[in-house]
Image (spheres, helix red, strand yellow):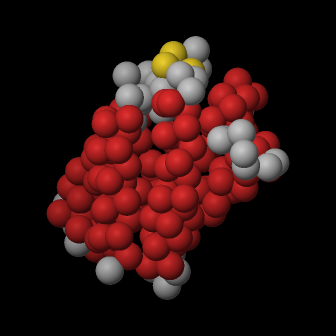
Amino acid sequence: MTRLEDGMVPFIALTGGFVVLRLIGLAGIDVLDAWQPALRGALALMFVFTGVPHFLPSWRRDFVAMIPPAIPHPALLVTLTGVLELAGAAGLLHATVAPYAAVGLALLMIAMFPANVSATRRGLTLAGKPVTPLPARTALQVLFVAAAIAAAV
C-alpha cells in the first residue's frame, strides 16, 4: 500500500480526499458545499501524488522505462506528463478552468494508458516491485477517467 503505481495511493487520495472535502463542505465551507468542487479537489490531490514522482530520480527511471520502446524521447515524455499532471491539478482548483483541466487530465490518462499496458507485458517494475496487473490497473484507470469526466461536467 505504500507503492504509488499499484493504484492504492492515487485511489486513497481520490476517495479519501473526496470524503474529507465533502465533509468540510457539509460543515459550512461554502466553496466545497457540493460534490463537484470536492471531487475536483480530490482529483487535484491525486494528481499531485502522481505528478511529483515524475521528477524524483528513482521513480523517474522507472517511468522512463515504462514508455514503449517505439516511442521516441521517453525522458521528455515523462517530464511532459509530470508537468501536465501538476498543471492539471492546479487547474482543477480554479473554477473557470476546472472543466477544461478535468477533460485534459482525462485525455492524458487515456493517452498514458498504453505505457501501463507495455510495462505489464514487459514485466517491468516500479520502485523495485512488479507493476500493477493489467486487470486491476484497467479498473483503476476507468475509475480515474470517470472521475475526471464527472469533474468536468
Quadrant in which the N terminus appears:
top left
Q: Position of residue 114 (x, y in %)?
A: 53, 48
In-front residue for pair 96/2: 2
Residue 11's quadrant in the figure?
top left
Q: Position of residue 99 (x, y in %)?
A: 44, 78
Q: Position of residue 14 (x, y in %)?
A: 34, 48
**Height in image: 101 above or below 117?**
below
Left or right: residue 43 compared with residue 104? left
Residue at the image point whose x is 65% and y is 41% from the top: 68
Left or right: residue 29 compared with residue 113? left
In-front residue for pair 52/63: 63
Residue at the image point whose x is 30% and y is 70% from the top: 150
Residue 65's quadrant in the figure?
top right
Left or right: residue 129 compared with residue 39? right
In-front residue for pair 36/30: 36
Q: Is residue 135 visible?
A: yes
Residue at the image point whose x is 72% and y is 45% from the top: 70
Residue at the image point whose x is 49% and y is 40% from the top: 117
